[in-house]
Image (tube, grey):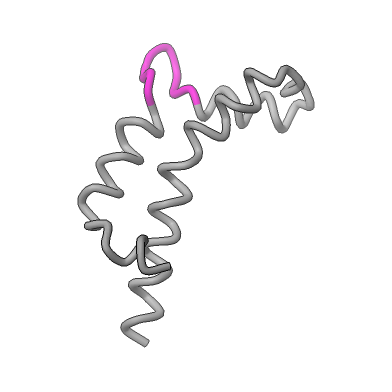
């Protein structure tokens, strides 16, 4: 958890907005993979890895925000 605390919030936001959403057109890649997951068509290992790769910055940001909220309370 100490590693998450040392990452600046600006870097976490930047990573989520760039790496987490890239490529942007025709739709963000993570959105496409989440739709595949909901439809039950996310079966190829490459697609699962791709979802994990694009979700990682978002999970980092959520963890960072949660740690910041707990530190305040």
Q: Residue pushed farthest bottom?
A: 73
Horizontal arrangement in the rendering, residue 71 relative to residue 28 (left or right): left
Residue segment shown in magenta: 22-29
Residue drawn at x 51%, y 29% is 30
Which of these two is toward me, 33 or 45? 45
User: Looking at the image, is 17 positioned above or below residue 8?
Assistant: above
Q: Residue pushed farthest front?
A: 2
Residue drawn at x 38%, y 53% is 61
Query: Number of labelled discs?
Result: 0
- Residue 34, position as x, y percentages in the image: 61, 31
User: Looking at the image, is 13 positioned above or below residue 62?
Assistant: above
- Residue 25, position as x, y percentages in the image: 38, 14
Name the image quarter holding the N terminus: bottom left
Horizontal arrangement in the rendering, residue 31 relative to residue 11 (left or right): right
Horizontal arrangement in the rendering, residue 66 relative to residue 34 (left or right): left
Residue drawn at x 34%, y 81% is 71
Residue drawn at x 63%, y 20% is 47
- Residue 23, position as x, y percentages in the image: 38, 18
Which of these two is toward me, 45 or 35? 45
Q: Residue pushed farthest top?
A: 26
Q: Quadrant of residue 26?
A: top left
- Judged by its main secondary structure, the magenta piece is loop
Asked if residue 44 lies in the magenta stretch, the reply is no
Name the image quarter holding the C terminus: bottom left
User: Looking at the image, is 40 positioned above or below residue 70?
Assistant: above
Asked if residue 23 lies in the magenta stretch, the reply is yes
Horizontal arrangement in the rendering, residue 7 relative to residue 43 (left or right): left
Q: Quadrant of residue 22?
A: top left
């Amino acid at each position: 958890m100490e590693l998450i605390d040392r990452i600046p919030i600006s870097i976490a936001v930047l990573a989520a907005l760039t790496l987490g959403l890239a490529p942007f057109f025709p739709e963000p890649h993570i959105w496409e993979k989440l739709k595949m997951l909901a439809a039950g068509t996310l079966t190829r290992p490459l697609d699962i890895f791709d979802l994990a790769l694009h979700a990682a910055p978002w999970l980092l940001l959520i963890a960072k925000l949660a740690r910041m909220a707990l530190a305040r309370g």
